Image (cartoon, helix red, strand yellow):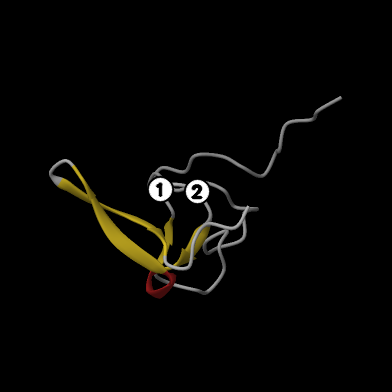
Amino acid sequence: MHLADQTTQIKTDGLRYQSKEPGSVFGPMVGLMSCLVCGLHRPRSALRPFRIGAGINYRCRGGCRQ
C-alpha cells in the first residue's frame, strides 16, 4: 500500500517538495549529455558531434558500450 507524502505541498510562492533533497539526480557533475545512440549520460568531452539532416547530435566518442 502506498501512503501519500504529507510533507509535500505546493506553497503560495509556487515551490514544493519540502522533503526532497536539493540538486540533480546526476550529482555534482555538470555538462552531462546523453548519447543519441545508446542513451547513456556522459560528459560532453566523451561525446562527438555528428549531423542528421540540419541538426547536430552527439554520440559516444569511443563507440557505444551497452
Residue 26, percent from left and from top: 55, 63
Q: Amino acid at mark 2?
A: Gly
* Residue 45 vertical placement versus 22 (above, below): below
Residue placed under numbered mark 2 in the picture = 39
Residue 19 falls left or right of residue 29: right
Mark 1 nearby-residue class (10 Å; few <14, some 14–19, many ≥20): some
Q: State the separation of the CA atoms marked 1 and 2.
A: 6 Å
Q: Residue at x 57, y 48 (%)?
A: 17
Residue 64 falls left or right of residue 45: right
* Residue 16 vertical placement versus 26 (above, below): above
* Residue 8 vertical placement versus 45 (above, below): above
Mark 2 nearby-residue class (10 Å; few <14, some 14–19, many ≥20): few
Q: Is mark 1 in CB contact (under 8 Å) with mark 2? A: yes
Q: Say what secondary structure mark 1 lies in.
A: loop
Residue 42, percent from left and from top: 49, 65
Q: Amino acid at mark 1?
A: Leu
* Residue 7 vertical placement versus 46 (above, below): above
Task: Give the numbered dot on residue 36.
Answer: 1
Q: Nearer the viewer, residue 47 or 33?
A: 47
> Farthest top residue?
1
